[in-house]
Image (cartoon, rainbow, N blue to C red):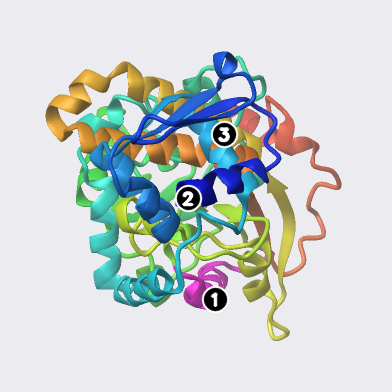
Amino acid sequence: MKRAFTDLLRNTDFPYPYTVVFCDGESYHNGDPEKSVFTLHFKARGALEDVLRRGSMGFGEAYMAGDIDIQGDLEQLHNLSFHIGVGGLHPRPLEVVKFFFRLMQTRPTRKRARKNIAHHYDLGNDFYKLWLDERMQYTCAYFQSPEDSLEQAQEQKLDLVCRKLRLQPGDTIVEAGCGWGGLGLHMAEKYGAKVRSFNISREQVEFARARAKQRGIGADRLEYVLDDYRVIGDEKRTYDKFVSVGMLEHVGIENYRAFYDMIYRALPEQGMALVHSIGRVWSQKTDPWLEKYIFPGGRIPSHAEMVAPIEQKDRPFFVADLENLRYHYALTLDHWSRRFEDNIDWIRERYGESFIRMFRLYLRGSAAAFRFGGLTLIQLLLHKGYLNDAPLTRRHFLAANSDSAKTARTAGVV
């Protein structure tokens, strides 16, 4: 087993030095051991076999249990796994069958969706406050410079979304999946929009409502609705704009056509929608460890899977713009990881060492996937019908002082 693993490593073209230490004390070195970017230590007997037999699930669970230790750059270890590719670290057919059985148990029906969301997002506001920005944005930020603070980059993301939707005072907005409510508050407070935001996490909705009340934003301007986003499609009302940031990953690919049908029904002619989602450069099943421990029922779509369900001959619904912000998410995760580590004692006291290892693996593995592993961050801008008066260039996406923001300030909104 050890020889098969070292042969696999020798046949992998990886540009950085690293070290692997086996439980019997024997070591494998790729390059100068003094310059190793990480050291992977198999501390328990059977840990290596578990990794080779069960892939990412075996590795993740062994690391969480302390049977594997990693010193150094955890992100570069994930980079090595991407270089290894389809050999070695992928699960056996039996594990794939188990995964599909579990996936069938977590398909996002309305009842299951609540359970899946609670698994991750209801860990407690105090926990997320430690490492998110002050607006509690748990989605990709937008950096105009690598030196931007997390708070600055998240505000720039909110403004980018609003500029793409060409928000004006009085516009009516419906938001599917609002998190802690930062985008809706930003739209109402800075752009003068009237917003209805849907979420099935009670703790997040209560936080959002309290924050809006604290800022003096009434329910006539901003309403947080504790309900499933699919209710939007059941209502007989339309909105000027639709927005969803970081929720498509939880919808389920088999539900995408219904999701876009819902958006289409919620918009009037010449209405606009923005869908912001993690994507992949190729179609791939959800990693079993990530699906079990981090996002039950989640599935990241490929670009084709994301866009193809929009295409229907019987309706004029157009992709007006598609932007890939891949590297922005890697930078966002770097900020989250640093803040997570800065608060490690508080987290360890309340959640334990296994939780720390789980979340650290998730944050650094995600950063590696955006840098090296084929994950992307896509913003889709959709138009219902023919918007022949739309701006001819993308300049208004990038302007620091967009026309809509200027209009909002002139109207006394800001």
Query: Which mark is on residue 81?
Result: none
- Real-space CA distance between mark 2 and mark 3, rounded to the nearest whole angstrom: 15 Å
- Looking at the rendered structure, the secondary structure element under dot 1 is helix
Return the disc, 2 or 3, that comes first in the chain's sequence.
2
Give the x, y percent position of residue 196. 38, 53
- Between 223 and 48, the one lying in front of the other is 48
Disc 3 on helix, strand or loop?
Answer: helix
Classify 10 Å Cα crowding around label 3: few (below 14), some (14-19), many (20 and above).
Answer: many
- Identify residue for label 1: 261
Residue 268 within the magenta-colored segment of the rendering: yes
Which three-letter amino acid code belongs to the residue tagged 2? Gly
94 vs 392, nearest the viewer: 94
Q: Please state the horizontal and vertical placement of residue 383, each as a whole percent of the image.
A: 69, 62
Q: Which residues are magenta?
A: 252-270
Residue that badge 3 annotates: 330
- Residue 191 vs 109, above or below: the answer is above
Q: Callout 2: few (<14), some (14-19), or many (20+) C-alpha neighbours within 10 Å? A: many
Question: What residue is shown at x 44% (from left), y 66% (from top)?
Answer: 251
Front one among 38 and 109:
38
Q: Quadrant of residue 342?
A: top left
Q: Quadrant of residue 109?
A: bottom left
* Badge 3 amino acid: Ala
- In the picture, measured across the screen, residue 9 lies left or right of residue 287, that is right
Amino acid type of the residue that numbered disc 1 sits on in the rendered structure:
Asp
Identify residue for label 2: 246
